Image (cartoon, rainbow, N blue to C red):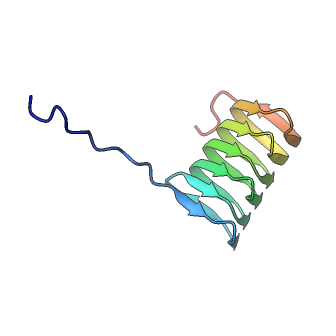
Amino acid sequence: MFGINTPEPSTKIERSRISEDLRITGSISASKPVIMSGQLDGNIDAVSMHIASTGVINGDIKADNLKIDGTVIGNIVAEQLHLSASGCLKGEVRCRSVVIDEGANVEAKFIKELNVNG
């Protein structure tokens, strides 16, 4: 009766964005999802990360969920990894689940683990 037509408030996920005009040297730690369009020369520890097609990371990544459309040169520890067709990966990967789209550029050693962040 009351509030039947009242829409429920949407829960918008807050994300940190690093734009393509930024180049960061050093380590990053994030408790919210990160969208990387710029360049990072250092390591990152994030709950969730999306490396856009313009994004470049020269360093190690630790994330529960990681999607790579750009370039990563370094080691990865992730629960779930998705490397898209435009993605480039060079390094070592420890993960539980991985998806590699046709066309991705991969030079990596993969180690499947049951629980990588525990």
Give x and y (percent) for residue 9.
Answer: 28, 44
Residue at left 57%, top 61%? 17
Report the front residue among 15 and 6. 6
Residue at left 14%, top 36%? 3
Give x and y (percent) for residue 69.
Answer: 74, 47
Classify residue 58 by image quadrant: bottom right
Decide if residue 5 is on the left or right side of residue 79. left
Classify residue 100 by image quadrant: top right
Is residue 11 depicted above or below 42 in this figure? Answer: above
Q: Quadrant of the N terminus?
A: top left
**Residue reaching furthest left?**
1
Decide if residue 108 is on the left or right side of residue 28. right
Give x and y (percent) for residue 81.
Answer: 69, 37
Is residue 104 depicted above or below 75 in this figure? Answer: above
Q: Quadrant of the C terminus?
A: top right
Give x and y (percent) for residue 40.
Answer: 72, 65
